[in-house]
Amino acid sequence: MKKILVPVKRVPDYETKIKVKPDGSGIQTDGIKWIVNPFDEIAVEEAVRLKEKLGEVEITVVSIGPSDSTEQIRTGLAMGADKGVLVLSEAEIDSDTAARTLEQVFKKEQFDLVLMGKQAIDSDANQTGQLLAASLGLPQATFASKLNVADDWSTAEVTREVDGGLETLKVSLPAVVTTDLRLNEPRYPSLPGIVKAKKKPLEEISISELGVDLTSKVKILKVAPPADRKAGIIVDSVDQLVDKLKNEAKVL
Amino acid sequence: MLLVLIEQNGSKLGKAGRIAISAALSAKETHGYESVVGVLLGGSGTAEAAKEASKYGLDKIVYLEDPSLANYLAGTYSSILIDAANNLEAKAVMSLSGTTGKDMMPRVAQALDAGQSSDTLEFLPNRQYRRPMYAGNVIADIELTTERQVVTVRSTAFDAAVEQGECPVENLDLKVESDSQQQFVSFDSVDSERPELTEAEAVVSGGRALKSEENFKEYIEPLADKLGAAIGASRAAVDSGYAPNDWQVGQTGKVVAPNLYIAIGISGAIQHLAGMKDSKTIVAINKDAEAPIFEIADYGLVADLFDVLPELTEKL
Ligand SMILES: Cc1cc2nc3c(=O)[nH]c(=O)nc-3n(C[C@H](O)[C@H](O)[C@H](O)COP(=O)(O)OP(=O)(O)OC[C@H]3O[C@@H](n4cnc5c(N)ncnc54)[C@H](O)[C@@H]3O)c2cc1C
């Protein structure tokens, strides 16, 4: 039995217009719809496809966060993952703490592959997968748009979306692979999938039980909205547009 | 001391390299490092690029030229950078936040037990950093609580360095140990005569409305040629195969801030705006007057792109 670990993060829906609290202490969370970080959803989908193709695979989805994160774990289970782990933490988790927590989860039962999102769309840090690979001494292949696992699970070939084109790497397994947008199109959980997900095992552990030091390396001091950009004008013809670009904006 | 990774372009320094230098100089001033050392890693031509990099106001350049470094690998590159940081007793390590920096810098942070500020926009006093979150809808001031610090910087937030003085250039006295866990297989590059997207003065971007790769060629390319512009694309256009991934502008693609950005058949989703809203002049062409792209465009033209693009290209 091969084992895949897929971390999923609870984040605000990507269509939400995020607003900052007036005192700059954080974002306004009232009325926000919470989803699985889209890149993590792609990671779940890829794991499920590997299971469908290669059989004998057990997929564990893990989330670190408040108890509400069970919703995101259930989504992963409904998509086809086998079991869930919730690492309970009420404290804000930064990339480094997340990576050190995942390190402990990994060490508890050893996995053959970690598939995770390249970035979380809330903090936009793009660090956790690489931090985890480094701390476990595993190879990494980030920004994957194609993943081929060898039949014997000794290696994987990964195509990566990088500046300038597409790079293909071969990594030994176990490895940490982070997903980019083109890897796949995640399925919607089916109704039977959702029903089944409710019966799948979901273990809860507290982050302190795992022995994770919660000292954060990154402290957010204050947040603010970005500088406003004012709407300009609507021109009524190509001629007027060319004239404005030449004589007003002076960019031609 | 601050150690900055300079990504050269073959044997040339390139604009990205000059931006990395100017960001490092800005950190030196604001965060009070006594010196900045630039480091270049790569295959043939690296020594030459290192020589060029020594003319932009840094205190020292070190480089490692080795055939095994011709193709970037996270494991190999990060272990050299970690060794260099330790040997030279760097307090901070920095790079641009292109895909190389994003890929390797967290490994450096892990090894140095450092906190990392990703995609940094500005260095603030008291060793604080300003960086975007939530697709640029939130700008955060952060502090790294660690003794050593790792930083990636957004290239559009800094001007390229200008020539000033010259500093010593040294060969890095380190052995390259190739990583047995990661093996380079191939690179499929997007060849283009056009300027690099993140460095261009003008960018013409196409969205889902283009409907095909052929239409990108027929409608977007002539306009870009006329302007000497780079070509960008929305995620929808890349997902649909109309444009290569290297062209994606946005939260999870490239961030650009040219003098002129023309968005054609792009609706203006938050994720796209995150990658272009700092452009100086923004033009939007869209047949839907309600498209959100018009809320940030300086000049909007409500029209069918297939009708107006040939005319626009001709009249420029
Ligand atoms: C995790 C995540 C990350 C993302 N990252 C990015 C990113 O980095 N970059 C990015 O761009 N997007 C990103 N997106 C996607 C983003 O949310 C939008 O879906 C995408 O930008 C839409 O692309 P579009 O504007 O080309 O397509 P659409 O939203 O479909 O817009 C097409 C527009 O073309 C107009 N149109 C149609 N026909 C014509 C015509 N003949 N002439 C003129 N106008 C016409 C329509 O009115 C419409 O406004 C991301 C999404 C997620 C979930």
Image (cartoon, coloured by chain):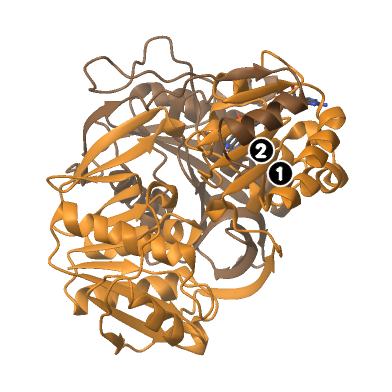
Residue B262 lies left or right of residue B257; in this view the side is right
Q: Residue at x 47, y 18 (%)?
A: A17
Chain letter belonging to callout 1: B
Q: Quadrant of residue B91?
A: bottom left
Q: Position of residue B108 (x, y in %)?
A: 32, 64
Residue B234, disc:
2
Q: Amino acid at mark 1?
A: Val
Pointer 2: residues within 10 angstroms few (<14), some, or many (20+)? many
Q: Is residue A87 above or below residue B95?
A: above
**Of residues A71 and A163, the one drawn nearer to the viewer in this rendering:** A163
**Of residues B72 and A171, the one drawn nearer to the viewer in this rendering:** B72
| In the image, the residue with mark 1 has its CB under 8 Å from the nearest atom of ligand 1 | yes
Residue B126 lies left or right of residue B215; in this view the side is left
As drawn, the chain in orange is: B
* For the residues bearing labels 1 and 2, Cβ distance under 8 angstroms: yes
Residue B238, disc:
1
Residue farthest along the top direction in this orientation: A31
As drawn, the chain in brown is: A
Q: Is residue B112 above or below residue A80?
A: below
Residue B251, disc:
none
Q: Residue at x 47, y 43 (%)?
A: A119
Residue farthest along the front direction in this orientation: A247
Q: Position of residue A5 (x, y in %)?
A: 49, 48
Dot 2 falls on a residue whose secondary structure is loop
Residue A238 lies left or right of residue B28; in this view the side is right
Pointer 1: residues within 10 angstroms few (<14), some, or many (20+)? many
Dot 1 falls on a residue whose secondary structure is helix
Q: Position of residue A104 (x, y in %)?
A: 32, 51
Q: Is residue A22 above or below residue A102?
A: above
